[in-house]
Image: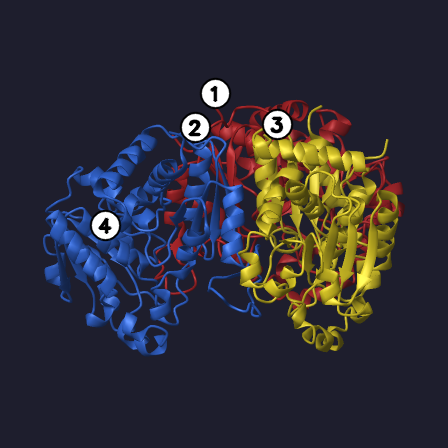
Chain colours: A blue, B red, C yellow
């Protein structure tokens, strides 16, 4: 029997995802439960977190469980992930031991591990979380690596709260926005996956072809769309992309062709500040909603007016992190 | 209905403060309760903490609640507090989102945010905690900003344990002491507020007029004294200030006229090392008690002999943090 | 009545240690208990931790208690340990206050404080934990200083799981191994103490006399061996040391004669990389088991083949940390 992890929504069937969302809705009505009584989860943070940390730690507690927060390289030992290495560098221990020891202590391991931003051919292998999944003997949950499946679930839950369960036929715009730093594509990849999975007509809006996402996710998006009755379109034209949209989801990311050579990408990025989500653009939509995974830099990615408008469902989406993650933890480790 | 916060004791009536102290005394007798069952609190630490962190985290737990500890800029994202900013600096998200999202997760938000020590005209606005209070939809608790109301309550509780509930007529000396760094005026401001609030005859002892506290707190102190039958006197003479005192409370702080130009203040501060609380000074008192908020540098602010004497109630005061904070949390978020 | 601490196994009788091990075995079968209901423990980490942090925090929780994790100098104030100091350096408070205040809040204090690696004549005094023990009014637990008694208990428990309760007559090799940094002797000291305590025939295998452990621990080892029917032998010959061994326990440490002058030790250390535990060496043993306290650098201290072999019980030993520490906490602070 293979161990069930929550590494990407692509490994879970629509029926399974729908069941998670139904359970999350139940937790939104009734916060406390005992599904994780006597159970525990290790939260491994290789990168900072506010919402993820709070919602996982609190979510485990509200179901009777216990979260242990660890930051390897800061308050815990730095870890090696490659196989066969002569470990004479910085790492003091190997993920094989970390994952196996934690599996003796806890019932779930959750991992946040961003890319290193130097070589996409390496980062796209998502080594850290896959190494945990390979060596752990308990389920592993993705708290954001090169995708962010928990965010996906919170996002689709927030959309269903606005539009009803059936999202098919909704016009969904995933728009790139400017940010002073080249950011992770994780949430963009994830938005593509989940929006196509739920059968929406998805437009990926970005400055030019350099900002397309990794082919793995573009291909998943097209296949999801074909399977679920939606579509995936690429656009570099802001006005036509926004026109008639039901959903605008914003995210900034660094262009993959310049990965690790960010100085060369900077000029293009700087020239595209006008992708900011503002009232004029939102006025083109079909009275659409706006969302973002947070953290969001105001007046860089979206204006104050958009963030503070009734169209903004980013806070709902953030709240839903708590509910969907409880559903994921309960599905993987909860009592039957 | 306005949301009730615990930002400063000045916003709470004497009857309300007395009720908190009574509840704190009850918690000192019986540690465990269920007032916060199913409830949670986010503890936002922008600065280090030992007592505050321990007593809040443990206090919430002892009442059945759950504390989540966050350190923005370290393990969570750096935060912007100004309104309307184009966020192209260090901050990755705005307090508007942080406070609103946390309000969806937890029932209370507590904030420690020290001054930046560069421009008192800005620091005295206490922007961080006020921004949280403005945007949060749950009560906000001050864990020390430019005042330290939880310390005030623990302090007055320790005094009442020695002198009885009615502290009127007690001679109270708030003495500045040397410290190698220019420190926050928060606890000094707070001592002034609470000692005058409880009707004591307060002397603010400091090297010269440059060490007077911000007029806002001097004015509050005078008004409190007038209202509660006490007095507020300024002194630069150590001997007369100590003579006959019932309470000596020590604190170091940087002189406000030199705020941000600390190099220029250093000489004055260095020349005032003799303000250290020692046995000779304590011998001038009316068999008085000594206290301090801690952390305290021994043999800098107070001698070993004073710290280890029966007159020292600093450990009692520190313990009382646990009890008064439980009372505050229960008052703001507890079940009726 | 003297307060009972858990600073070193040498302060505990064999009967007491055996009772801890029996209780640990019980906790391995039944994880949850209520011995620490309403109780709490402060975990003071002056150094990083993964297993210790997780197992103490989780262990306290599983017995109904609450752990508070503190990192002085990082998220809490830096601490002074010397007596009588004029505290005008980095430390903001004295251990006298820290220990006394924490004793008011919690029922147990656990401390991890590694040596400073500059002057062994100072480090060998183990000042930090002794200062906590002197000033605290609750029991203090050693989470690794210059010994690591919790590791000892987990280690002997893992050995008993393989060999049965009576370990007398087993051939036990404590082998030094290479590591790029000069490490703490704590676990080596501890292995010597506990292996001799349980009557095994112990060989300390190291490159040369410079790697002998501090006379305090060598003497304890000899005395323990005499008392418990075992022996303590020193060897610098790998082959004869391994031959017929039932247990190989590996650890790296810096040579004490070069303490603080590590540049001079480096050459000797580098010349001894062949002390790595590999299959050829393990083939010399009596089908022996291999263990290590972790973290372990693979292919530096032990090869992948050894780590992944059935002979390796390091993961069991790590798991046992959870169980033995629960037994220690319950013994010191649990309800009768």
Q: Earlier in the sequence, mark 4 or mark 2?
A: 2
What distance separates the C-alpha of mark 2 from that of mark 3?
Answer: 18 Å
Say which quadrant the N terminus of chain C sits in: top right
SS state under label 3: loop
What distance separates the C-alpha of mark 4 from that of mark 2?
Answer: 29 Å
SS state under label 4: helix
- Would you name the residue on which mark 2 appears? A34
- Residue B109 seen anywhere in this rendered image of the structure: yes
- Would you name the residue on which mark 3 appears? C37
- Would you name the residue on which mark 1 appears? B336
CB within 8 Å, label 1 to label 2: no
Q: Position of residue C127 (x, y in %)?
A: 80, 53
Local crowd size for mark 3, using a 10 Å CA cut-off: few (<14), some (14–19), many (≥20): some
* Horizontal side, residue B130 vs residue C226: left or right: left
In the image, what residue occupies the spot 77% across and 29% down?
B162
Which labelled disc corresponds to residue A194?
4
What distance separates the C-alpha of mark 3 from that of mark 4?
Answer: 44 Å
Q: Position of residue B234 (x, y in %)?
A: 72, 47
* Horizontal side, residue B246 vs residue C59: left or right: right
Question: What's the chain of the residue with tag 4?
Answer: A
CB within 8 Å, label 2 to label 3: no
Displayed quadrant of residue B210: bottom right
């Amino acid at each position: 029997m293979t161990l069930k992890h929550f590494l990407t929504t692509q490994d879970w069937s629509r029926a399974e995802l729908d069941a998670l969302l139904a359970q999350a809705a139940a937790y939104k009505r009734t916060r406390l439960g005992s599904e994780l009584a006597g159970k525990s989860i290790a939260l491994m943070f290789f990168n900072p977190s506010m919402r993820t940390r709070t919602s996982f730690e609190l979510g485990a507690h509200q179901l009777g469980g216990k979260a242990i927060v660890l930051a390897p390289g800061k308050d815990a030992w730095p870890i090696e992930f490659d196989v066969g290495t002569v470990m004479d560098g910085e790492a003091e221990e190997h993920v094989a031991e970390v994952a196996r020891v934690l599996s003796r202590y806890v019932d779930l391991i959750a991992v946040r591990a961003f890319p290193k931003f130097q070589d996409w051919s390496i980062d796209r292998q998502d080594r850290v979380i896959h190494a945990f999944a390979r060596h752990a003997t308990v389920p592993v949950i993705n708290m954001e690596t090169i995708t962010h499946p928990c965010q996906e679930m919170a996002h689709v839950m927030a959309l269903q709260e606005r539009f009803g369960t059936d999202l098919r036929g909704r016009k969904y715009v995933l728009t790139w926005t400017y940010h002073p730093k080249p950011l992770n594509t994780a949430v963009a990849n994830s938005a593509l996956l989940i929006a196509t999975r739920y059968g929406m007509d998805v437009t990926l809006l970005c400055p030019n072809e350099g900002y397309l996402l990794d082919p793995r996710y573009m291909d998943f998006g097209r296949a999801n769309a074909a399977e679920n009755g939606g579509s995936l379109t690429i656009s570099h034209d802001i006005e036509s992309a926004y026109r008639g949209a039901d959903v605008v989801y914003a995210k900034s990311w660094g262009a993959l062709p310049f990965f690790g050579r960010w100085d060369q990408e900077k000029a293009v990025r700087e020239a595209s500040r006008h992708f900011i989500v503002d009232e004029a653009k939102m006025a083109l939509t079909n009275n659409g909603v706006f969302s973002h995974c947070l953290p969001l830099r105001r007046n860089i990615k979206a204006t104050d007016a958009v963030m503070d408008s009734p169209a903004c469902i980013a806070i709902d989406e953030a709240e839903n992190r708590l509910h969907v993650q409880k559903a994921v933890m309960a599905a993987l480790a909860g009592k039957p």
